[in-house]
Amino acid sequence: MRVEKNCLGEEKKGEPKKMFLASHLTAPISSTRFCFSSSFTLTTTIFPKSPSFFSSYLRSASTSSTPSILLTNPPIFTTTTSTSTRRRTFSPRSSSTSSAAMVDAAAAASDAGMDAVQRRLMFEDECILVDENDRVVGHDTKYNYVLLRPLGSGLGHLMEKIESENLLHRAFSVFLFNSKYELLLQQRSATKVTFPLVWTNTCCSHPLYRESELIDENALGVRNAAQRKLLDELGIPAEDVPVDQFTPLGRMLYKAPSDGKWGEHELDYLLFIVRDVNVNPNPDEVADVKYVNRDELKELLRKADAGEGGLKLSPWFRLVVDNFLLKWWDNVEKGTLQEAADMKTIHKLI
C-alpha cells in the first residue's frame, strides 16, 4: 500500500489516481487548489489558455459516473521540484464567479450523456464568429463554453444564448448533383446534437478557425471546409470533389431552434457542385442517403408538411428550397451556375 501526502499535508492511502480534475470540486473556485503527486500523468500538455486541457478533461469526464463541473476560468499551472518529491498544483484564477457562470458550468455537466463523437466536435471544433455583414469578429467552440469568451457568456449552439447574445457563426451547405441532375440528400444521424434524424441537403457544417478555412477570396476557405466535411460525413475523397468545382451561389442568414435547448444561428454559404461520386456514409454523422429528382423532392416536401412517418426536413434546407433551389436547379441542368451566383447579397431569412 502506497502512502502519500496531499497538498494540505494530509496522509493519503491507496494507489494514486491516474487523473483528478474538477470532478470533485466542492469549495468555492477562488480558493480551491488541486495537487498531484509525481506519479500523476496527463497526456495533454497544459497551458493557461489551452483548450487541450479541457479536451482531456472531457474525455475523462465522459467515462465517469461522477458529476463534473468545468472550470470557467483557465487555471494557473505551476511545478515545484525538490530532492524527495515533485508536486504539481492547479490554482484556478481568482474571480468573482457569478451565478450565471455556475449555471453555465452545470449546463456543461448536464450534457455528459452526449454521444462521445458529437461531444468532441462540440467542444473542440472552433467556429468562425461573424457579424451580420460576414466580417470575422472572433472564434469559439461550437459549445462556446470556456476560455475564449468572458466569464458566464457563450454556449453558441444553446438557443438561450443565441437569443440573448445574438451569437452568429459562419456555415456552409453543399448541394451535390450527379450527372443525371439528381440531388444527393442525407438524413442526419440520431446522435447529432442539433436536428437529429432530419433530412437535409448533401452536407451542412462549419468552416473552422484555421488558416485554410479563413480565406475569404472567392470563398476559398469555405470551399476547403466543404471538401473536408464531404470526406468526414460521406466518405467522398477530396480528389472527387476538387475545390475549384464548387460554385458559391449565395449567402443567407437564418436562425432556427432545434429542440428548445439547442439551435442554429448561421451565416450560411450555399455551395453547388455537379459530380458523380461514390458515397460511404460515416454512421456517426449520417443515418441514410438518397438521390432525388425534382418530383421526388416535391413528394418529400409534401410528406414533411403532412408529418407522414415522422419525416422532417432541416430548417435551412427548407429555406433554400422555398427561396432558391428550384430556380437554381434550372441553372444546374443548363450548366449556367455562374450566371446565378450572387455573393454580394446576404439574404436575411429570419
Image (cartoon, grey):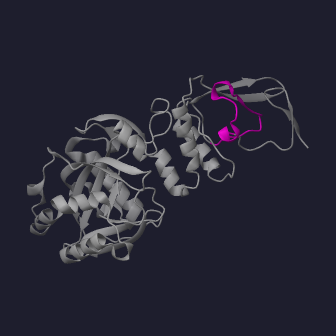
Q: What stretch is highlighted in magenta?
A: 21-43
Question: Closer to the camera, 64 or 339?
Answer: 64
Taking the spot 43% from the left edge, 51% from the top edge, the residue there is 262
Relative to 18, 335 lies left or right: left
Q: Report x, y in % for residue 75.
A: 60, 29
As drawn, 118 above or below 97 = below
Which of the 4 image quarters holds residue 202? Answer: bottom left
Q: In which quarter of the image is residue 24?
A: top right
Residue pictured at 44% horizontal, 37% vertical: 154
Does the image show residue 246?
Answer: no
**Residue 327 position within the rendered picture, expressed as x and y whole percent measured from the top left:** 12, 64
Counting every numbered tag in the picture gives 0
Q: Does the magenta stretch include residue 24?
A: yes
Q: Measured from the top left, where is residue 220 in percent x and y?
A: 25, 47
114, above or below 107, in the image: below
Secondary structure mostly seen in the magenta stretch? loop
Left or right: residue 278 versus residue 27 is: left
Q: Where residue 337 sits: x, y (%)?
A: 13, 59
Q: Looking at the picture, tell me which residue is in the foreground, 25 or 4.
A: 25
Towards the viewer: 67 or 15: 67
Quadrant assignment, res 114:
bottom right
Query: Does 274 appear above or below 35?
Result: below
Judge whether 63 appears above or below 146 on screen. Answer: below
Q: Can residue 226 be seen in this view?
A: yes
Would residue 344 be found to the left or right of residue 184 on screen?
A: left
